[in-house]
Amino acid sequence: MAASVGCGQQGGSGVTVAKEVFGYADGERPVYLYTLKNANGCEARITNYGGIVVSLTVPDRTGKPGDVVLGFSTLDEYLKGHPYFGAIIGRYGNRIAKGRFTLDGVAYTLVANNDENHLHGGLKGFDKVVWQAEIVEGKDGQALALSSLSEDGEEGYPGNLSVQVVYTLTKDNELKIDYEATTDKPTVVNLTNHAYFNLGGEGSGDILGHEMLLNADRFLPVDAGLIPTGELRPVKGTPFDFTQPSAIGARIDHDDEQLRLGGGYDHCFVLSDQGSPITLGARVYEPTTGRVMEMYTDQPGVQFYSGNFLDGSNVGKGGAAYGHRYGFCLETQHFPDSPNKAHFPSTVLRPGQTYSSHTIYRFSVR
Ligand code: GLA
């Protein structure tokens, strides 16, 4: 069984959030770095630029702290561009085919930023927004609330969309992410976080030895542009079956059409236990450090991305180049291209409704 272990001195019972300047966007606008700490000495550092989780420090089985997310130590490196390390993704996580959809009979055209398709909110998605930030009092102590207004027409989307994302580090070594959004016109929304995890520690190597359980008995096959074909395919008998724990690398190079199209895993999995309250979607174990990460969500899907596009061109916080498959993402979300797939769960948000989504990443050791 997994057990929680503290990684430092026991302090008071509350979680604290401290604020410092991280750098300047557009040469003048201050951007902040918030450090969330719990009484176990675990720590999450989050910036209001893109809502990026810059670092996440949790203990290994000997109690030694380690940073388990990929990222940079300076704002400038994030400003230069990167593959969405730790960022909030919106308005729409993952792809919308040809950047087009029709809602209530009106055709909308979004920015195409991934060949002919729209990916992760467009050219300036929520990963590049300087969010309003506020330290708020939660159940466990302090938390970080980020908010932003995405204006009608931004990247082609209809409606003024008001978004709030609350990051909470709990006393149980969980990073909790709660998303909410409202609109003044019918629109589509699909928010997520794009943290790349490496439970062996960022920069320590590839993630192929991590053992993963995914509570998903179907996945969404894709076409050559990584757009779901519309089929919900059973994982049974395929390299996509993680219903029993399996090393991420065990079958990743199998001769399989879907693995070829994704260059590895880059697919949305259909979670088997859906809805509220939130349920276990994944459990990942890293054998050398003993770290375990559990992911809980109320979303219907999770995009499991095995870091196939990482190519060593980004040098991380600890000085290591992030090579092929040095991190994996578990992006909780509705399915990609839902606005064009009537049989997928709806991502439509209407005036008067509140979009909400909840995800927890829980850390322990074995
Ligand atoms: C998502 C996509 C991938 C890729 C990464 C970022 O996971 O599905 O295809 O775009 O983001 O590189």
Image: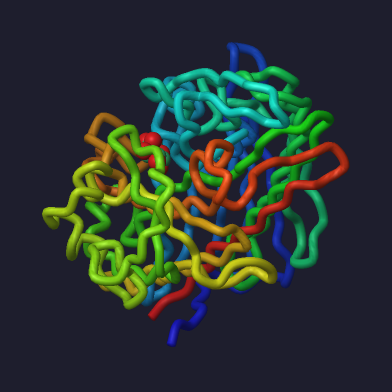
The answer to whether 251 appears left or right of 200 in the picture is: left
Residue 12, quarter of picture = bottom right
Residue sitting nearer the eye, 157 or 280: 157
> From this viewpoint, is residue 123 visible?
yes
Q: Residue at x 62, y 33 (%)?
A: 91
**Farthest residue in the left direction?**
255
The answer to whether 194 appears left or right of 299 in the picture is: left
Q: Residue at x 53, y 54 (%)?
A: 332
**Percent of width and height locating residue 100:** 54, 25
Up/down of 226 relative to 141, above or below: above
**Percent of width and height locating residue 311:** 23, 35
Q: Residue at x 50, y 39 (%)?
A: 337
Up/down of 357 relative to 171, above or below: above
The answer to whether 333 appears left or right of 72 in the picture is: right
The answer to whether 164 appears left or right of 7 in the picture is: right
- Quadrant of the frame with the C terminus: bottom left
**Percent of width and height locating residue 322:** 27, 40
- Quadrant of the frame with the N terminus: bottom left
**Farthest residue in the top direction?**
27
Asked which colour scheme the image uses, the reply is rainbow
Quadrant containing ligand 1 reads top left
